[in-house]
């Protein structure tokens, strides 16, 4: 058994995962209408066992500090909306047994955002890069392991936006890898479960991206809330497990 002195001499490495995109990544699971209408929505506070906090799972706060992760992960990032259960905690809990180190989640998603708002030079993109770089600053043991990306619903309302999605997403992938100096950074993107008139164009674009270490998992068919746009809590847990399976496949390949 490892002693306290051994643990101090060999502190656990921190494996860092970026959570980015729009509202289905920030999470709306458990967000309900407030009967008192002030504000008009609230999170019901229910945390399923799959999303429970654990001392080995940390989150990088809006104030750029590490703290124990808990739902809702994006409460201080996606501040203009009410956040609830997303896929992040279910993902982290699912990979804990396979990844022996400390897990660090860096929430960056913001609801209602289009892919063009995540272009290099735009506030959302630059803030994401800043947060990621700050999360590893001064920590030689930290390693950025993957970007989990769920976005695109905002690009399904307009045909031009849907047509441009593939190129915009490919640019995002190249830019984030270049700016982090991680040319092979695994990126797990989620093909949309919901959207508007041009959803199939965006889904086709997401599935057609053919770049090494870019994996696409399909959320189509996961249960939606009454708004027919956001995944419910059960679906978010399932998505977290799907993301975990995709990452574990990459992790085992790298470590084989």
Image (spheres, grey):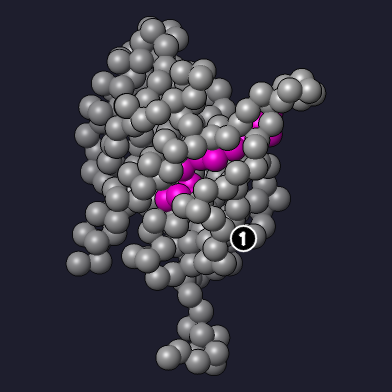
Q: Is residue 227 above or below residue 58?
A: above
76 or 71: nearer the viewer: 71
Residue 48 % position (x, y): 52, 48
Residue position for label 1: 68
Residue 119 % position (x, y): 48, 29
Q: Secondary structure at mark 1?
A: strand
Q: Quadrant of the N terminus?
A: bottom left
Query: What is the crowding at mark 1: few (fewer than 14 residues within 10 Å), some, or many (at least 20)?
Result: some
Q: Is residue 174 above or below residue 55?
A: above
Answer with the quarter of the image where residue 68 lies: bottom right
7 or 118: nearer the viewer: 7
Residue 255 % position (x, y): 25, 66
Q: Quadrant of the C terminus?
A: bottom left
Q: Main secondary structure of the magenta part?
A: loop
Residue 36 % position (x, y): 78, 23
Q: Is residue 162 above or below residue 62?
A: above
Residue at (23% x, 43% y) in the render: 212
Residue at (73% x, 23% y) in the render: 35
Q: Which residues, given as a range, are shown in magenta?
A: 79-91
Q: Is residue 226 magenta?
A: no
Q: Is residue 85 magenta?
A: yes
Q: Is residue 60 shown to the viewer in this render?
A: yes
Residue at (56% x, 58% y) in the render: 53
């Amino acid at each position: 058994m490892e002693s306290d002195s051994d643990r101090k001499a060999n502190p656990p490495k921190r494996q860092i995962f970026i959570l980015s995109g729009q509202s289905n990544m920030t999470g709306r699971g458990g967000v309900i209408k407030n009967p008192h209408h002030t504000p008009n929505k609230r999170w019901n506070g229910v945390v399923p066992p799959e999303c429970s906090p654990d001392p080995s799972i940390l989150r990088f706060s809006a104030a750029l500090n590490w703290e124990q992760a808990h739902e809702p992960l994006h409460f201080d990032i996606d501040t203009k909306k009410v956040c609830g259960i997303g896929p992040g905690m279910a993902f982290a809990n699912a990979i804990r047994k396979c990844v022996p180190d400390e897990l660090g989640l860096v929430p960056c998603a913001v609801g209602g955002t289009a892919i063009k708002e995540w272009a290099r030079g735009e506030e959302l993109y630059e803030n994401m890069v800043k947060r990621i770089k700050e999360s590893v600053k001064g920590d030689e043991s930290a390693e950025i392991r993957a970007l989990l990306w769920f976005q695109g619903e905002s690009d399904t309302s307009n045909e031009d936006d849907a047509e441009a999605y593939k190129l915009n997403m490919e640019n995002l992938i190249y830019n984030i890898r270049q700016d982090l100096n991680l040319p092979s950074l695994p990126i797990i993107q989620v093909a949309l479960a919901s959207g508007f008139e041009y959803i199939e164009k965006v889904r086709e674009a997401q599935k057609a991206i053919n770049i090494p270490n870019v994996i696409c998992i399909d959320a189509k068919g996961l249960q939606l809330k009454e708004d027919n746009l956001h995944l419910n809590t059960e679906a978010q847990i399932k998505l977290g497990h799907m993301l975990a399976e995709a990452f574990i496949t990459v992790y085992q390949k790298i470590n084989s």
